[in-house]
Image: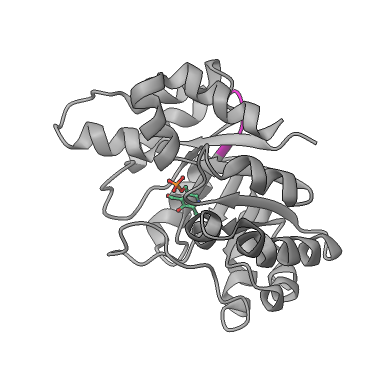
Amino acid sequence: MNTKLSVNINKIATLRNSRGGDLPSVVEAAIRCQMYGAQGITVHPRPDERHIRYKDVKEIKPLITTEFNVEGNPKYDSFVQLVLDVKPHQVTLVPDSLDALTSNNGWDTISEKKYLTEIISEFKKAGIRTSIFLNPDVKLVSHAAETGADRIELYTEDYAKHFLINKKEAIKPYIETAIEALKFNLGINAGHDLSLLNLKYFAQKIPNLLEVSIGHALIADALYLGMEKTIQNYLAELK
Ligand code: PXP
């Protein structure tokens, strides 16, 4: 099974926003990433629009020929409305606070189960696939399934951090969580700090990994290798 590569283009927006204007264009980035072989585009609009703006998300949607994944915190009504308006293929729910530099935790699917069940049912009614961001913790999986989510996205920061020290230990909780997720028929995505260094091992070890979303390292690699070569390199790691 080939794991799909969804390129997170938030960093392109961050670069654009640093100077105002429209350079580099996030619309062009989405088109080119797909042209170069990416099997999906991910955006993570935050209510303060410091990276991708809501307007970008609306402009990008009609240009998506692959899969559009919109990530964000549904506790902000503006995010929920955006997703319902744009109707991406997938919404990934992330409990990030406004001031977090980047996503830094998964859902507590026990204390938040009622809330997640309600909001997931709203997205499902609109025909949007739902995925919830999850720490690698077996205990959380059955509760994640009870929310009605289609998939989980494994939060891989911890894996990336410990990969260089002991990759076997680093991947262990992720394998256990993935095996548990399969028992409940949950699809498995993953993301955060995945890179050319640690991606192949992760994809080889996690059963039925459907999709990875990668931004920071991939865009950094593209500075030196170019976007086309970079995407090819990431795809090769997933074969
Ligand atoms: N998944 C989620 C939920 C994220 O918030 C992010 C970062 O925005 C990613 C994946 C991608 O992480 P990275 O930019 O480190 O590749």
Question: Main structural element of the magenta stretch: helix, strand or loop?
Answer: loop
- Choose between 167 and 22: the one closer to the eye: 167
Write down the region rendered in magenta.
Answer: 64-68
Quadrant housing the C terminus: top right
Direction from residue 63 to residue 120 in the image, left or right: right
Q: Measuring from the top left, give residue 92's x and y in whole percent.
A: 56, 53
Q: Relative to 188, does residue 27 appear above or below in the rendering?
A: above
Q: Relative to 31, does residue 218 appear above or below in the rendering?
A: below
Residue 15, by quadrant, is top left
Q: Measuring from the top left, give residue 108's x and y in whole percent.
A: 56, 77
At horizontal 31% and vertical 23% (from top left) the residue drawn is 25
Residue 53, by quadrant, is top left
Q: Is residue 64 in view?
A: no
Q: Relative to 10, does residue 149 appear above or below in the rendering?
A: below
Question: Is 209 covered by the magenta stretch?
Answer: no
Q: Relative to 22, does residue 119 appear above or below in the rendering?
A: below
Q: Measuring from the top left, give residue 56's x and y in whole percent.
A: 36, 34
Q: Identify the colour scheme used.
A: one colour
Q: Is residue 107 in view?
A: yes
Judged from this view, the residue extending furthest toward the left is 19
- Choose between 147 and 217: the one closer to the eye: 217
At horizontal 74% and vertical 68% (from top left) the residue drawn is 145
Q: Measuring from the top left, give residue 110's x and y in whole percent.
A: 63, 82
Direction from residue 220 to residue 174 in the image, left or right: right
- Choose between 71 and 218: the one closer to the eye: 218
